[in-house]
Image: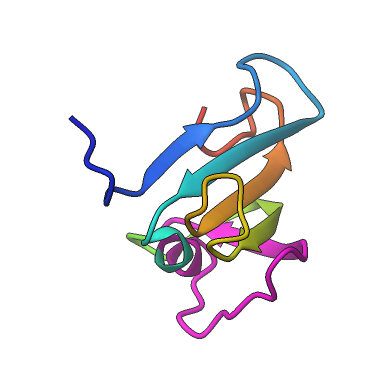
Amino acid sequence: MIAQTDTIIALSTPAGRSGVGVIRMSGHDSLTILRKLVAADSFDPDPNILTLRTLVDPKTTEQFWIDALVCYFKAPRSFTGEDVVELHCHGSPVLAPLR
């Protein structure tokens, strides 16, 4: 069971082929997870502004061969009222990092 304090991560666009795939994180740890995905502990994105970043494997810091537009929505001004992060990346099932 998911507690209200858990950070959830889900594909926000339908599975399959698309120009853009959106992955959404919602919860207290969203910004921390984003910082690990862009290998920048000091990354402090302006809310509601898309920023182009290179994604990395958080365990190895090896760069994925794709970039993503990332957007941070600071609580309480988000879809869920919590901190929310969106990753806008390639929509192809072959290229999207979480498909």
Q: Is residue 34 above or below residue 42?
A: above
Q: Is residue 62 above or below residue 39?
A: above
Which residue lies at the image location 51% right of the left edge and 85% below the top edge? Answer: 42
Q: Is residue 98 above or below residue 74?
A: above
Which residue lies at the image location 69% right of the left edge and 76% below the top edge? Answer: 46
Residue with the most extreme right position: 19
Residue 51's quadrant in the figure? bottom right
Q: Magenta region: which residues?
A: 33-57
Is residue 39 located in the magenta-colored stretch of the structure? yes
Q: Position of residue 84 (x, y in %)?
A: 54, 54
Residue 30's quadrant in the figure? bottom left
On the question of residue 79 being in view, the answer is yes
On the question of residue 63 being in view, the answer is no
Is residue 32 located in the magenta-colored stretch of the structure? no
Is 7 positioned to the left or the right of 96 in the image?
Answer: left
Pick the residue in front: 95 or 77.
77
Q: Position of residue 37 (x, y in %)?
A: 49, 61
Q: Position of residue 7 (x, y in %)?
A: 35, 49
Residue 33's quadrant in the figure? bottom left
Is 22 positioned to the left or the right of 43 in the image?
Answer: right
Q: Is residue 84 above or below residue 16?
A: below
Is 1 positioned to the left or the right of 94 in the image?
Answer: left
